[in-house]
Image (cartoon, grey):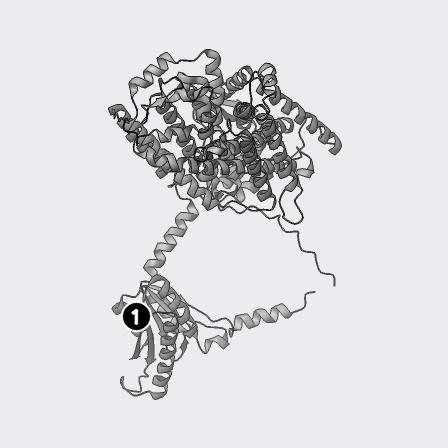
Amino acid sequence: MATAKTAPAHPPELRRAVTAWGSFSWGYSDVGADIFVGLGLVLAAAAGATNVAFLFAGIVYVCIGLAYTELAAAYPFAGGGPYFVLRGLGDIFGFIAGWAVLLDFTIDITLFAWSCVDYSSQLLPSLVGSSHPWIHFGAVLSLIVALCALNVIGVRESTAFNGVVAALDIVSETSILCFGFLFAFAPRILIHTMATAWPSPYQLMLGTSLAIISFVGLESISQAAQETYRPASIIPRTSTSLILTILIFALSYSNLALGMQPWHPIVGPHGQHLAFWQIFPNNPDNQGKAVALLAAQVPYWGALAAFYVPVLGAILLLISSNSGVFGSSRIAYSMSRLDLLPSVFQRVHPRFRTPAVSLVAFCGLAVVTLVFASLPSLFPGAVAFYRDVLHGEGGLDFLADLYAFGAATSYSFVFLALIALRLVDPYTPRKFKIPLNAPVRFRGEKTSIPVLGIVGFFGIFSILVFTLMTHPIGRIAGPLWLAAGVVLYFVYRRHRGLPFLRSHPRNWRQHQIDILRTSGDLELLDQYTAALKAADERAAERA
Amino acid sequence: MNPDATVHPHIVGAAIAIALFAMIAATFWWMLHPPSSFVERQAKKAASELERMVGSIIVLFTPEIVSSHMMALAAKLARGERSELLALYVIEMPYTLPPDAEMPLEERAALDALGAAETIAKNNGISVRTEIVKARSTKQAVLDIAKRERANLLVVGDHREGRYLGAPLSRTIEEIAADAKCDVLIGVEGKHGTLLVGEAADDQTPHT
């Protein structure tokens, strides 16, 4: 007698084991490092309006964070921004958002490896970029290659290690800021600096567009959503806490830096006393390690902080650089599964079982950006070309340009996706909703439009415009990256026989049921199926 | 330290420092205390009930009731929850004999059963009290001792004869379960049970 064939087993699913702290530290290891890079750049660009630049970018960031929180809690699937955009706006826009995120993650690798070396140079002077450019370049290149190799052979960083570093850094930054405000903050210096060193509108726009890089990385929490236990309950808390923590730190650092009475007098090249913020303009070495310099100027605590903050900062930045390595391969893998990128990005190494092609491809791109950023310092002959053709942009500025462009582009699409999903998918239970909603009726269904989402869209779009206006390389290289991606997308879709501009049909309802079934919040599954049933009944009545 | 270093504390700075610390602390407290889900509340309730349930455990043996397999389980429970454990052997005296009549065979069986219980407890690293009681009614004796000991859990095995008759719970076990003022855990040993024998027979029946 023939035996009946057994039914195919369900494909293995990611186990939900990430706790509230795990989810937070996952995001913090990415976003938390941003202030280490952004503070010096914004102080150099916006001078006396640094706090205003951070405030504007911070308000936009809060809107972005709330949008990501709502979307990640409602759609806890490992795809992040591109996935939300794909569901809300369709394949082509999902691809563009994903491609912009890929630019961000690729730049993330170089930018944070670069800053890691800058922070290390505080204790190891031979790594200072301006005086030892080749050693600096070699150190950054070695870090990128090492991270790539470690990820290819499958050595994973420990989640527990990330959690410990995040905890240490939060304690450290809180201590620096509390001691700084307690012993070194003088309101009159802050007012004086803002009054006398207010930048031109151009510099303020430049500073604001750079300030947004201090808030990039919320993508990580939504990336971790599929592995987070009870995401609908946990993610709103971890995400909101992350938003608040980063915002508090960014605003505190910027105000402290402008209103600080340094512990040790800072003397300029002509023997004059300088305010703390004045050590950053035209000094790339200082721009790359602003938090360490600030920590050393905090009374009492600074004696200790001068030694450990460069080390802690370097570790956090290295973790962040690593999150760029695996984040880019993970996004590429996810986009490939959604038919947005060729299947080569899903290919895993036969021995190491890691997406080696993606890892090597994006680390290779990171090395290209490193070479481009380092050329003026490595070859003095290239300085004239950079100065005349590219308006003097090189090094950290070049990387920051592209980072800001990628972030502003992808975040703009996420806001649009948030609004679109409210309209086309009002059935998915949203345990967390972005505040301020206007009720509307769309295709016969009651739903709401997020007012803050619209505000946030205009905010981030204005930052995108600032970036294009004030970053000479960003306005060329960023759109070129997107254009190259769209060409790749069309070639791939043609090869696969998939529609160019229309979306590939997908059963989103069943997909959402599968997500909620494994999420741990079964009440939400009941709500979703009941909402679908009621919607179908209403549709039948109308028909 | 630079001898010129000067410190200028300002009331505004101090207020900001305190507010900053409070905001960070409050944010993390809020984040790490999410509301529990329905299943988590159920699990917590069950765990707290377990603590209440196993504060004091009595394992019952009689000539008719075999509980040695449950003794191992009770010992592990008692070790995990740090409960008091009593192994009780009840010899039911027939009305044809005086209440204190000698029952050498039953008393010998009681010593064997309780000795085994002590060994099991020792192997699990806990201490067990043992007691042999002669009574007219097993049920009443068990209920009285449970009341005296303020027992939270009575652990009972299955009926020796009933195993082979397909009725592993004898009338005594059913009465104890019905009248006890505490939780009763009844363990039917599977390997000799008629139900399992029946299932095995069913499995071997060819499907048509």
Quadrant where the image shows the N terminus of chain A: bottom right
x then y, percent, for residue A292: 40, 31
* Quadrant containing the C terminus of chain A in the rendered view: top right
Q: Position of residue A85 (x, y in %)?
A: 58, 29
In the rendering, at what x and y percent does residue B168 appear?
46, 72
Instruction: Report the amino acid beneath label 1.
Output: Leu
Q: Dividing the picture into quarters, in which one does residue A299 lie?
A: top left
Left or right of residue A356, residue B81 in this image: left
Compared with residue A341, is residue A354 higher up or lower down, i.e. above or below? Answer: below
Of residue B24 and residue A143, the one placed in the foreground of this image is: A143
Q: Which residue is mark 1?
A: B143
Are there few (<14), some (14-19), or many (20+) residues within 10 Å of tag 1? some
Q: Secondary structure at mark 1?
A: helix
Q: Nearer the viewer, residue B1 or A461?
A: B1
| Viewer-closest of A104 and B195 | A104
Check the image and report above or below for A21 versus A211: below
Whether residue A450 is visible here, answered yes or no, is: no
Q: Tell how many labels.
A: 1
B180, above or below A291, in the image? below
Of residue B174 and residue A222, the one placed in the foreground of this image is A222
Q: The residue marked by circle 1 belongs to what chain?
A: B
Q: Is residue A447 above or below residue B125?
A: above
Does residue A279 appear anywhere in the picture? yes
Residue B151 location (% of width, % of height): 30, 66
The quadrant in which residue A368 appears is top right
Which residue extends farthest front? A270
* Residue drawn 64% across the image and 38% down it: A360
